[in-house]
Image (cartoon, helix red, strand yellow):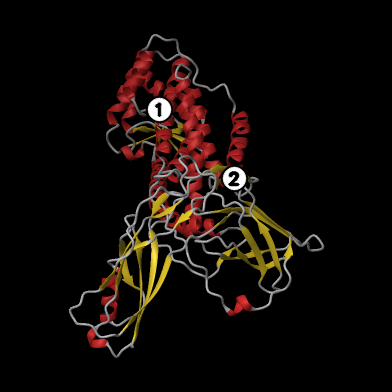
Amino acid sequence: MTLDALGTWVMGAYLLSVVPLAVAWLVSHALGRQRASVRHHVWVMALTIALLAPAATGIAPRIDVPVLWTPALPHGTIEWSTSRVDLTAAEDAGSRHQDSRSRPTAAVMAIAWLAGAIPLLFVYALRRTRLARIATKARALDESPRVRTHEQVVVPMLAGLRRPTILLPAASTLWPRHELEAVLAHERAHLARRDHIIALVCEAATTFYWLNPLAWMAAVALEHERERACDEEVLCGGVRPSVYAAAMLRVAQGLPERAWMIGSPAMAGSRLNARVRAVLADAPPSSGRVPLSWPRTAALVIPCALLMATVHLVARAPTTPIAAGASRLPTVVQLPPAPMTSDALRPKPAVRTQSSVAGDQSVTFLGSLLDTFGRVLPDKPMMLTNTVTDARHESRSDQTGHFTFTGLAAGEYDLDAPVPGFTTRYHVTLRAGQQVQRDITLQLGSIKETITVTSAPRPERTPPQVVDLPPYRPESSRCADGGPLSSGGCIEPPLKVRDVRPRYPQDRLDISARVVLEGRIGTDGLIKALRVVEPADPDFAAAAAEAVGQWQFTPTRLDGVTVEVGITVNIRFSVQ
């Protein structure tokens, strides 16, 4: 498994864990007046579901639940390109853009998770190994092989899984008999409740979900309710509250030392003051047993885990427009038509509209045509061209932006959607017998301008020529109607209001050159982030950058919202 796949799986598991842990927190607070054993059982079920749900994702059936999302829109320069954009049956251009940005996040998540989970796993394994060695070397107490004492044990606790042993401090042989019996009653309650196995579940949950604060909150609550449930069991067994409280205080004397051992079920658990007050309260003792058997618990936990593993949230772009004034918007501009090529002049076979293919191997390709904002593009022509046979299939998006191509043969196709201002050609791979449903998100372009500068001699100190253009009078956006827009793709291109012509370098009048510059037209119409994108003579590059950097445009608007736009300037210095 790669880091990307691991990180994606871990992030999905963390999202799944929020539901059972949050529900357990609400239920445990609602059951505040119930027995501690009931609240403990709630937390055990929540942690078990949180652990089983990610493991069940590989075997449970998948049910996609679509949810709306607002796309994280790119900003800065978006380059115009006539190259094809590949679309597979599993993704379109927009979803692939999202995946390419999510891969680094998934890899970082995997590395961060491993950096914490591996040390925690090592610590838990080391603690259990040391407790097992202590249990092996400990001495039996009163001829009982399952009750042992050892000098390194500071508080009573359980050790082991298959044959758990009660470990007591070596000083326990000097305790009063009635207090020792109260301590043993508490540890036997842990054994009867199988708390040594539940502690393993808690360790697994905190190891896997160490980045989730809800998991640590659940672990603390589980430990507290576990000890309270054993206290209830001891009092229900007939131990006097005053004797039991004295035994708890005596045990707590060794708690500050070697706290690394505390984690297995131990009498000196958390919140000792609150436990002592609860023990000495006048309320009658209640049983620490939960009125729900473990088989019935499994009958509840397993279906819940499978249900959580079955549901998958699928992001879907909203079809409603983005209100004017939104920030971090993408770049777009009305572009001139692409030049004719030899491929465009090559004769094409007759157009087939929604042609059918015999047999059950035909392919249906459908979806929605969207702009970069996720808004629909209604009534736009679309064409699929088979790259091998040149067979063409035409369609058109309806008023809701939906399109359908039916009766397609499997193969490689070029998808053309000639919407001005967007990349018009994409590549689609269709496999036999499929119905492919994917939304097509048209990628946006940048403005291009080509100018020629001749080598007519001028005085060396003559500044660059400034061309006077008609003054710009701001008008209201033709794309904004004062309310929500019903569709997208409305573009207002920039108009140049200040043009500065480059100056031919005086010591290069006998040399021709070419300089290509890229930059951005900001929301204020000024040129930003200008750079040379191809190797060029430094003198020519400096002259070109000096002039283009002084250009100014009217604001570019997409659906009535001012945005930045990329610009590419091709400057030819020609000898006259």
Image quarter hosting the C terminus? bottom left
Give percent across and percent down for residue 546: 26, 72
Q: Which residue is mark 1?
A: 224
Is residue 309 or residue 567 the one in the foreground? 567
The residue positioned 35% from the left and 39% from the top of the image is: 261
Give percent across and percent down for residue 463: 21, 74
Q: In this image, 414 relative to 162: left or right?
A: right
Asked if residue 176 can be seen in this view, the reply is: no
Q: Quadrant of residue 429?
A: bottom right
Which residue extends farthest front? 470
The residue positioned 38% from the left and 42% from the top of the image is: 134
Which residue extends farthest right? 359
Q: In this image, 279 relative to 370: left or right?
A: left
The number of numbered badges drawn on the structure is 2
Q: Callout 1: helix, strand or loop?
A: helix
* Residue 562 circle label: none
Pointers 2 and 1 in contact (CB under 8 A)?
no
Q: Which amino acid is tagged 2?
A: Ala
* Residue 56 circle label: 2
Give percent across and percent down for residue 343: 61, 77
Asked if residue 285 can be seen in this view, the reply is: yes
Give percent across and percent down for residue 303: 62, 36
Is residue 492 or residue 562 the one in the foreground? 492
Is residue 163 or residue 3 the one in the foreground? 3
Tell me which numbered mark, 2 or 1, is placed earlier along the sequence: 2
Q: In this image, 513 relative to 228: left or right?
A: left
Up the image or down, 73 lies above or below 505; here it is above
Up the image or down, 93 lies above or below 488; here it is below
Q: Callout 2: helix, strand or loop?
A: helix
Q: Which amino acid is tagged 1?
A: His
| Of marks 2 and 1, the one in the foreground | 2
